[in-house]
Image (cartoon, rainbow, N blue to C red):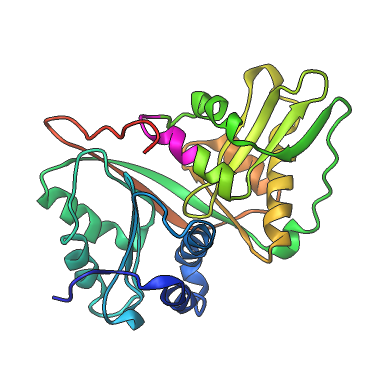
Amino acid sequence: MSKLQQVAGLKQLEQLRNLYSRDSKYLKEFYCLENYLELHKKDAKLRNVKVYVLPELELGLFVIVDRYQLFMGCLESADSEELLKDSLSQLTWFGGLQCGSMPHRYFKAATQVIQANKLRLKNLITNSLFLSQEKALQFEVNPPVGFYLKSLSVKDAQVIDDHWKWSEPGSLFFMQRQIAYNICVGLYEEENGELVAWCVRAPDGLLAALQVKDSHKRRGFGVLIVKEFSRRVALQGLDVMTEVDQDNQASSALFHKMGFQVIGQCHWLLTEAENGNFQWPDGE
């Protein structure tokens, strides 16, 4: 069994990302690696982020441990499932670790390792959605009178985390980091500067945390935010990806109306320990 090792610098991370550019079924993995590559360019000493690979880089296997979130990928082959299982078994598992936005092809290996570590498991199934940069560049974005769009600021992170469905100890730091280093869009009232709608780019590169305050719903602000975010991503030469819970019909309809296409199924695997989950301290 080959031993996992930390990725050796930006060049090796770029080589790994490029392995996933050869087949469109690996779009999720490609944009995950693309986002972490850009994060490392902006901050070479990202705290509590480890990118693991095998000595045989051409196999394409990677595991990213970002505090309590874990992302993975492996180029499919006759041995890829066993290879991924062996690699995941080398990690230190703890209650609260999440396998985030994981393509279905990794489900069996990941669940077997989680069960072997005697952790309880909650499986949330999502649809993975895709919009080409060409379509995103066609969006026309015109905020209504009395409102303006701009990049989020780090001071907005608390409001966003307070409204986020998946807020938990440690998630505020994620929001602060993503806002500081990535494309994140907010809609504000001109009169008082109140943030009323927003979305951020998640650690794996997806459009995430799309939210409109209850006081401003049913005014088309969600569509406005998605269009502006998508346009900004496309201006960087990138396609746009997001995911939606399979039972969230309202969000699915919104993205479908805007031209997003379902390209696959993903899983969020949320682990729980019998003796309680590890709690990340504030600011870490």
Q: Nearer the viewer, residue 66 or 180?
A: 180
Looking at the rendering, in which quadrant would you find the N terminus? bottom left
Name the residue at 68% across, 66% down.
Answer: 237
For residue 167, above or below residue 86: above
> To which quarter of the image does residue 146 belong?
top right
> To which quarter of the image does residue 281 belong?
top left
Magenta stretch holds residue 172: yes
Q: Is residue 48 left or right of residue 163?
A: left
For residue 100, above or below residue 131: above
The residue range painted magenta reads 168-175
Name the residue at 74% across, 65% down.
Answer: 134
Helix, strand or loop for the magenta stretch, by majority = helix
Q: Is residue 248 left or right of residue 85?
A: right
For residue 157, above or below residue 136: above
**How far across and down, in percent of the image, does residue 25 sit?**
48, 70
Q: Please identify the residue farthest to the right as the structure is shown.
A: 145
Magenta stretch holds residue 268: no
Q: Is residue 71 left or right of residue 141?
A: left
**How far across and down, in percent of the image, does residue 69 sit?**
34, 47
Q: How many numbered markers are drawn?
A: 0
**How far across and down, in percent of the image, does residue 215 sit?**
68, 16
> To which quarter of the image does residue 217 belong?
top right
Looking at the rendering, in which quadrant would you find the C terminus? top left
For residue 227, above or below residue 167: below
Name the residue at 50% across, 29% down.
Answer: 161
**How far across and down, in percent of the image, does residue 200 sit?**
58, 42
Q: Nearer the viewer, residue 32 or 8?
A: 8
